[in-house]
Image (cartoon, grey):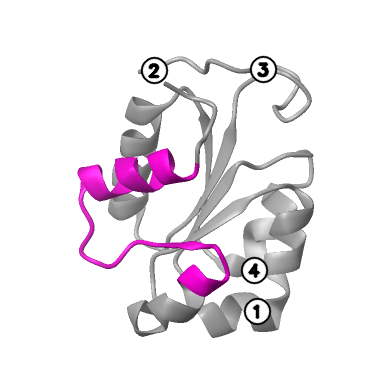
Amino acid sequence: MKDCVKTGAELPQDGTPVILVVEHDTLIADDIAGSLMAACACRVIHVRHPADILSSLIHEARVFAAFLEMRLSQVLESGLDRSLAERGARIILTRGDEDEDEVRALGWGMLVRPFSDRMIRDAVSSLKLPCR
């Protein structure tokens, strides 16, 4: 596991980046979390259903990234884009690859299924998380 190389106002008090993973399939969520933790010392919050996102983040002032098993329209219609942006989260969608151009135009990431460990690590790298 790699250590964070920055601390400060952009990090939670203990300096550990928080990454949200919304994925109904626990095996896929575990794979994503494992890849994230191998790429960066972070704390992963797994949520199975989008309706549980905000309650799972109630004590989190900052979220570095959110890997969402949601389509672009779902994120926008629910207002999650705004709620996550308020916490500083960079959004990576893992569903709705037909919206990839629009997703990228918003400055978000897209992981097209089936994705690999390398693709997850590349997504982390492109987000410039405070890790080596």
Residue at 39%, 17% in the rendered image: 2
Residue at 41%, 63% in the rendered image: 24
Label 3 packing within 10 angstroms: few (<14), some (14-19), many (20+): some
Q: Nearer the viewer, mark 4 or mark 2?
A: 2
Instruction: Pick whichever of labels 2 and 3 is earlier in the sequence.
Output: 2
Label 4 packing within 10 angstroms: few (<14), some (14-19), many (20+): few
Q: Identify which amino acid the numbered label 2 is placed on.
A: Lys
Q: Identify which amino acid the numbered label 1 is placed on.
A: Leu
Residue at 64%, 50% in the rendered image: 89
Q: Position of residue 116 (x, y in %)?
A: 20, 51
Q: Is residue 26 left or right of residue 51?
A: left
Residue at 23%, 58% in the rendered image: 115
Q: Position of residue 106 (x, y in %)?
A: 58, 70
Q: Position of residue 77 (x, y in %)?
A: 67, 84
Q: Quadrant of the image for the N terminus?
A: top left
Label 2 packing within 10 angstroms: few (<14), some (14-19), many (20+): few
Label 1 to label 4: alpha-carbon separation: 14 Å
Q: Is residue 124 magenta?
A: yes
Magenta range: 104-127
Instruction: Pick whichever of labels 3 and 4 is earlier in the sequence.
Output: 3
Which residue bears the numbered disc 3?
7
- Dot 1 and dot 4 residues touching (CB under 8 Å): no
Which residue bears the numbered disc 1?
76
Q: Identify which amino acid the numbered label 4 is placed on.
A: Ala
Which residue bears the numbered disc 4?
51
Instruction: Pick whichever of labels 4 and 2 is earlier in the sequence.
Output: 2
Instruction: Pick whichever of labels 1 and 3 is earlier in the sequence.
Output: 3
Label 1 to label 3: alpha-carbon separation: 31 Å
Which residue bears the numbered disc 2?
2
| Looking at the image, residue 129 lies above or below residue 117 | above
